[in-house]
Amino acid sequence: MIPARILASGEDWSANPTAMPARRKFLIFGLMAFGQFLALFDIQIVSASQRELAAGLSAGADEVSWVQTAYLMAELVMIPLSGFLARALSTRWLFVGSAALFTLFSLLCGLSWSIGSMVAFRALQGFTGGAMVPLVFAVGYTLFEGKQRAMIPAILGTVGVLAPALGPSAGGLITDVLDWRWLFFVNVLPGFVVATSCAVLLRIDHASPALLRRIDWAHLGAMAVFLGALEYVLEEGPRHDWLGDDKIAIAAWASLVGFALFVERAVFSPTPIVSLRPFRRPIFAFACLFNLVIGFGLYSSIYLVPVYLAQVRGFSALQIGQTIFVVGIAQLASTVVAASLAMRIDLRWMIAVGLSLFALSLWMTSGMTSEWGFAELLLPQLVRGFALMLCIVPSVNMALQGVPPQDLGAASGLFNLMRNLGGAIGIAVVNSWLQDDTHIAAARLSESLGHSGHAAAELVNALAARAGPDSAHGALMAQALLGRLIGREALTIGFDEVFRIMAWMFVVALVLVPFCKIDRGAPPPADAAH
């Protein structure tokens, strides 16, 4: 419970947020970080329960996939927009409004009566929840200084990785124990607590409503088209032959045109929705590039390992959760280490070690067989979890340390957008790689069996003999079993190839590290969230 005397304290700390009592700072930051957790947790919470959603809403597999796609598309648009809205509405009311509306739309998602209503409410849930993600970074760098500030990227990095990693297993467990509608009802009480508490406590800046009268609608529209169409292409491309599908080709062109107009408005508009000024600092550009790669590896590995465990090993949602949870344990162990090192050593050394360890963990995973389970995945996942914080902490410090006050909101939004974009690109690309590599492996395995036809025939006959006295039926069952075995082994080889390619990506990213000249200049002033 929050002490009554703290809730009753309505002081306005906008003049000097760093002078706020430490207990109040940590309370505000904790509440906002929990709001961020809810927004990121809900990205993946439906992924293990799509079959139940489809049955409950009388929807097809293609339709129910939009329950997740709509959330991601809307969230991508809000993340870079949050900096502008925070200046116009104030950080307090933007975060409170986001948390309250996120809670409301979570409730409406649980009450959905059709796939259309579900998709609409999920898009609104993602749009409102998206503002909570970058605001926490900006507020953390506004409230804290020195060693306390060094903990911000470590804490938020842990939240940013644990939330989507726990989503599938927690969602599957909730659906098994309760009902799929509780995937959304579970947000209502914590969302209400976050919104009401922050309404009382979060007073660190003032609104500038005049900005709302000068919105560059062309810039806003271009950003929405660019990011929304891009997410559609990335989500639907692997399933529909990419540009070979007319709808995806149209969306790709719309995204390209939207991007061109977005950049033109960002450069020439007197009041751009999203300022690109942070990119004038080379270190910020490098940090965003690293965040793109980190997002690619983070979300792709979170996606691939559960898919392997479900499709190759046949694990349940609970078993998958128990297997991948060790990543979070390793992260927690490395959080304090990474935060401490960030104050003592050159950040380039830290991110170099982090990228190297991440590459090593992916390379170790590329040796999977169709029999791998918890024990075999334990060490690669522990290495990956430890490496994540050594990547995330220095990249956040590179991006936000020393950013001018007027650019902190925009910098936080752009930086977080790059990680989400990296994740969206990563999942789409690894899906295509997995399909292609699996088909190639299946063809090679079939070809090998064809060359040694005598051995293959003997195997089929042996399997058929076990099926019973009906030789024709036994032969069909044996051939089907052999086909499943080939498919399983080909899929495993496909996973290995994908992890191997991803490992080389992180090795290539190391080339950029020496060019990152770290400027540990003065920290942003106290009003940095304006």
Image: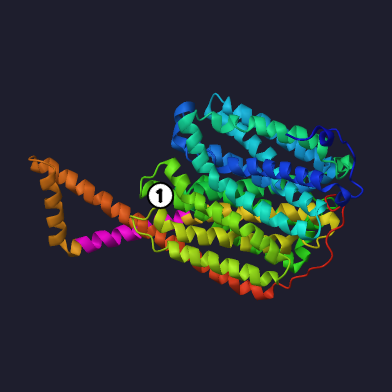
Residue type at numbered disc 1: Leu
For the point 81% across and 32% down, the residue is 4
Q: Is residue 240 visible?
A: no
Instruction: Say which quarter of the image contains residue 71.
Output: top right
Q: What is the x, y in percent for residue 10?
A: 88, 36
Q: What is the x, y in percent for residue 501?
A: 47, 65
Instruction: Say which quarter of the image contains residue 449.
Output: bottom left
User: In the image, which residues are magenta?
Assistant: 431-449
The reply, left or right, for residue 138 in relation to residue 53 is right
Q: What is the x, y in percent for residue 149?
A: 76, 57
Q: Is residue 235 visible?
A: yes
Q: Residue furthest left?
A: 469
Q: 331 or 161: nearer the eye?
A: 331
Q: Residue furthest right?
A: 15
- Residue indicated by mark 1: 309
Tell me the crowding category of disc 1: few under 14, some 14 to 19, or many 20 or more residues within 10 angstroms, Cα based: many
Q: Main secondary structure of the magenta part?
A: helix
Instruction: Say which quarter of the image contains residue 188.
Output: top right
Identify the image's colour scheme: rainbow, by chain, secondary structure or one colour. Answer: rainbow
For the point 36% across and 45% down, the residue is 314
Q: Is residue 435 magenta?
A: yes
Q: Disc 1 on helix, strand or loop?
A: helix
Q: Is residue 11 magenta?
A: no
